[in-house]
Every structure is written in C-alpha cells, then in structure tokens.
Amino acid sequence: MPIEDAAGQHTNAGLMRVRFREVRSATEELCRSLTAEDMMVQSCPEASPTKWHLAHTSWFFETFILREFVPGYRPFDDRFLWLFNSYYKSLGEMPEKKLRASFSRPGLDEILAFRRHVNEAMDRLFETGAPEAAVNRVLLGLHHEQQHLELIATDIKHAFFTNPLHPAFVAGALPVAEIPAPPIRWIGYEGGLVEIGDAGSEFSFDNETPRHRVFLETYRLASRLTTCAEYLAFMEDAGYQRPELWLSEGWDTVEREGWQAPLYWRRDETGRWQIFTLRGWQRLEDLSETPVCHISFFEADAFARWAGKRLATEFEWEHAAAQLPVAGNLFESGLLHPSAALMTPGLNQIFGDVWEWTASAYTGYPGYKPLPGALGEYNGKFMSSQMVLRGGSCVTPVSHLRASYRNFFQPATRWQFSGIRLADGANA
C-alpha cells in the first residue's frame, strides 16, 4: 500500500524534523572514530563501504523526497542519482555492488557536504510545511537510514576482522558473565487462529502487511537464546562433521566453505577459542554465556536438530513477541555485542542481542501488494531464496523495531548478528 495511506502514520512535520536530525546524527556519530581509509573498505560481497552508506542514505532522501516534493530543488550532483543507487532498477543504471570500494572519488569531504546539502534542504521542507505524503515518506527514509546504521556496524566489524591488525572499533573489553546463563525454561503458547502482521503501528514496511489470520498448533519457545557454550558443545560433538544434521544445501555449503565454527571464531596459539568483537578479540570463556551469533540459517537449523528441537516459524515468534514491550540489548545500550540472559520470568532476549533465524521462507503475505513505483523494489522483489529473521540485534535502534518487523537474508548469510532460539511443538 502507498506509504502515505498507511494506518496510523500522522506524525506532524515538527516532530518529524526532530527525529530526522536525531537519526542522521546517530549515523554520523557511529562513524566518528573511523578514518577515511576505514570508510573505503568493502571486505565481503554482502557489505558496503561506510562512505557509500553515508552517501546512499542521503541519496534516498534526495531521490524520493526532495526531487519529488520540493519545486525547483537543485540536486547536489546529478551524477549521484545513478552513482549511489543501490538496487532500484526502475530509476536507471547503477554501478555493480562489488565496485563500491573503488569509489575513491567523490572523497569523504564531498560525501559529508552532500549530507549537509540534503539536511539543509530537508530543514527548509519542514519549515515551509511539508505535506503529509512527504512527512510519511520521510518516516520511511528514517527507517531506511536506521537499517544502514545497523549495516555500518556489521560491515565495519567484518572490515576490521579481515584487517591483519584486527583493530577495535570501540575501546574497552566486554563485561564478563560471572555466572552461568540461567537454565532454559520452555514457555508454552496455545494454538489456534491468530492475527499476524502490522496492527496499525506508527510505521511498518509493506512486507508486514496485510494483517491476516494464521492457524498455529500449540508450541513452546526457549526462554532465552542459545549461548556460545551450548554451541561449542554442538561443535565438540562433531556437529560440523555429521551430514545427517544438515539440510542438503547446508552440508554442501559447509564442505565448500570449510566451516568449522561460527564466523569470527578462531583458536589462539594455545588452541583456545577466541571471538572477534567490535571491541577486538575476546576469550570464548569470557563470552561463553552470551548468545552465539554470526551463524547462518543452515547452522541454526543443524544445531536445533542436534538439540532435538527446531526453529520457530516467524508466525510463532510474532505471536509470542506481540505480547511484550520492545526492549532489550539494542544499539542504544552501547555494548554492540550480545549480552548474557538474566534470570527473569517469561521470554528473555526476544528483542535485541541477535536476529533470530526462523524456519519460515520469506514470501508475501496473502494479498500483499508492494509500494507503487520505484519504492516497490524495496522489499517485494527479494521474496525468493531468503529466510526470515525476527527480533533485532545489539546494533538495531530501538525505535526501528516492532513485533511485526520481518528481516530476511539468504540462508548461508553469517555476517549479520544472527543467532538461535529453540522451539518445539510439545505442550508446556
């Protein structure tokens, strides 16, 4: 449905102006410690250079708001329309993604000037009274930028990991969990006909609509996420050497890629495991009670089979999460890494820490319609060969999340903060 017709999206221009400044500033603050050289690195096919993220998020506001809603708007540089396009093919050609690290020009100073140019033009739009359609399009742009803030964190982590010096993005070690993670409790949910999808929140992406009914059998969810220690037990039980635990494509991927552990795990010179974090290398024993992260869907599914359980469907997850507030170890905590679960009743870590792989393939809901025009390419065209993740991670802004939010990646993806919550179908 058109973004300007979405239920509940009536935020006024004055408040939107404040939020615009907050989101844009958060992106730039995250990048403050990076050098211009850091911002050029594109270390894996999924990633993009930080400098490109800074430009593309400004491109989004210029392309979909300023060019459309501001008469006589003068673009910063007409070449940027195609140079910083990501995948909107209806807007024309664009450079291949793998070439983004070759963009030594425009330089960082020019990219930052582009951001200021867009910010100033957006300020003028707010001052003159932006129409509701424009304000709601801004809301989409802010959530788009928050997605890229998260991507900057994941991309720079991989860039620093591939650097032989293994620099830390943030100073100081992560806190050490002094007690074991609480035992897993199984939280039961009655089956039946339930409603899934956006229920009229201030904002939602088109792939969260329309709200529809789904029948669920009775199910249970683990009270917390799977820890590094638990995943290590899977590894030590030859989890990566037992094809009976793996989907066929997953086993082929393990053999082809030589996987033996999650991404960012390695053994030191004494044979002890270490984990690379945004604060540099940490000993596994210091992080053993924190959620395992940077694993693929294939690894999550194999672990669940090894444990005699399964992954939840996205509908089970949403049904459970809709009863809880959006709170947890998210971007605002400043940890930038999953934290250990607390001994509290009910479901823990449902929001934040790691994106939770589900057993659901990414498809459109019954009656789904993408946004009109180029914005229809935002979500809909990726509904093939991807799996759904839910819940956000330690680098997701809290205002970006809701229970109906659907993330999606190809099943072999590991560079995201992705992890495991076990499920089963037994009664509580």
Image (cartoon, rainbow, N blue to C red):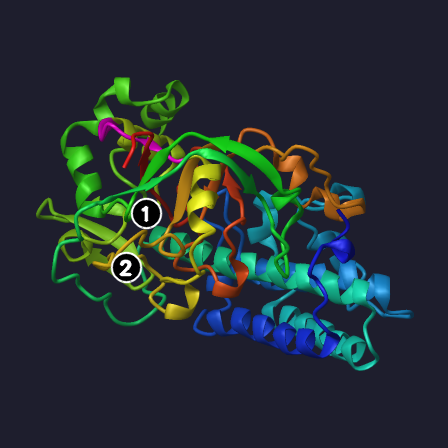
For this orientation, the residue located farthest to the left is 270
Q: Kindly tell me whether residue 71 is visible in this rendering.
A: yes
Q: Is residue 81 magenta?
A: no
For this orientation, the residue located farthest to the bottom is 127
Q: Residue at x 22, y 46 (%)?
A: 228
Highlighted magenta segment, given as a residue range: 306-312
Look at label 2 and name its amino acid: Ser
Q: Residues within 10 Å of mark 1 (few under 14, many from 20)?
A: many
Which residue, given by chain and number where applicable, does mark 2 sit on?
Answer: 339
Q: Nearer the viewer, residue 100 or 319?
A: 319
Q: Is residue 212 left or right of residue 395?
A: right
Q: How many marks?
A: 2
Q: Residue at x 32, y 37 (%)?
A: 220
Q: Is residue 352 left or right of residue 280?
A: right
Q: Secondary structure at mark 2?
A: loop
Picture quarter containing residue 248? top left
For this orientation, the residue located farthest to the right is 72
Q: Kindly tell me whether residue 104 is visible in this rendering.
A: no
Look at label 1 and name its amino acid: Cys
Which residue, given by chain and number where applicable, does mark 1 sit on?
Answer: 293
- Relative height, residue 78 to residue 308 (above, below): below
Q: Residue at x 61, y 58 (%)?
A: 201
Measured as percent of width and height from the top left, residue 62 is found at: 76, 64
Of the residues under marks 1 and 2, which one precedes in the sequence? Answer: 1
Distance from disc 1 to disc 2, alpha carbons, whole Å, reads: 11 Å
Q: Residues within 10 Å of mark 2 (few under 14, many from 20)?
A: many
